[in-house]
Amino acid sequence: MDWLEIAGYKTQPKTSTGAILKATLHHSDRILSVAISPDGQFLATASEESTVKIWSLHSGELQQTIFGHSTAVLLVAFSPASKTLLTRSRAGTVKLWNLQNGELLKRLAEVHRHEAVAVSPDWQILAIGTTRGTIQLQHLNSGQLLQVLEG
């Protein structure tokens, strides 16, 4: 029994030799980030090809492809309600997407190439680790700078 079956997901079909057939996550280039939605319904994959794909964890089927970055997508993160997706590209754009229709909701920030980005569990604060050794905390919805942590 594989881990998907243990977790309650659809088991993968087996060949006549008993080998499990695995779903193929079709991207034309490398997958750079993945996230599982908090409701356990979806898997998001971000790739070097500048797209994000949303897959059903139960069926393995592609649900939608999100276009809208001009460079590789380095980060994907689901909102707690699994209705919004945050992405960050190599060019430094941070965007929020509506998962119902794949539309861009908001462009949040521009970060430098080597800066790190994270979202608080309550989906209220965007943290940006800068190349200057600081962490900027921004309100996720308004973009307002809340605090700069020095360290």
Image: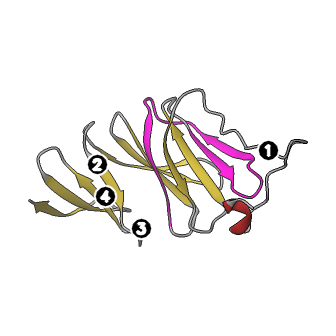
Marks 2/4 in contact by CB < 8 Å: the verdict is: no
* Residue 104 image offset from top left, x and y in percent: 52, 47
Instruction: Name the residue carrying label 4.
Output: 143
Tell me which label, 2 or 3, sits earlier in the chain. 2
Instruction: Name the residue carrying label 2.
Output: 116
- Element carrying mark 2: strand
Instruction: Name the residue carrying label 3.
Output: 123
* Residue 82 image offset from top left, x and y in percent: 58, 64
At a point 84% along the width and 49% down the height, the residue shown is: 13
Q: Residue furthest right?
A: 16
Tell me which label, 2 or 1, sits earlier in the chain. 1
Horizontal placement of 72 versus 3: left or right? left
Quadrant holding the N terminus: bottom right
Q: Amino acid at mark 4?
A: Gly
Q: Amino acid at mark 2?
A: Ala
Q: Amino acid at mark 3?
A: Trp
Marks 1/3 in contact by CB < 8 Å: the verdict is: no
**Mark closer to the observer (1, 3):** 1
The quarter of the displayed image where residue 17 is located = top right
User: Residue 19, which numbered label?
Assistant: 1
When the figure is inspected, residue 29 is found, relative to residue 23, above or below; the finding is: above
Cα distance, mark 1 to mark 3? Answer: 41 Å
Marks 2/3 in contact by CB < 8 Å: the verdict is: no
Cα distance, mark 2 to mark 3? Answer: 17 Å
Tell me which label, 2 or 4, sits earlier in the chain. 2
When the figure is inspected, residue 5 is found, relative to residue 90, above or below; the finding is: below
Tell me which label, 4 or 1, sits earlier in the chain. 1
Q: Which residues are magenta?
A: 52-79
At a point 63% along the width and 40% down the height, the residue shown is: 65
**Mark closer to the observer (2, 3):** 2
- Element carrying mark 1: loop
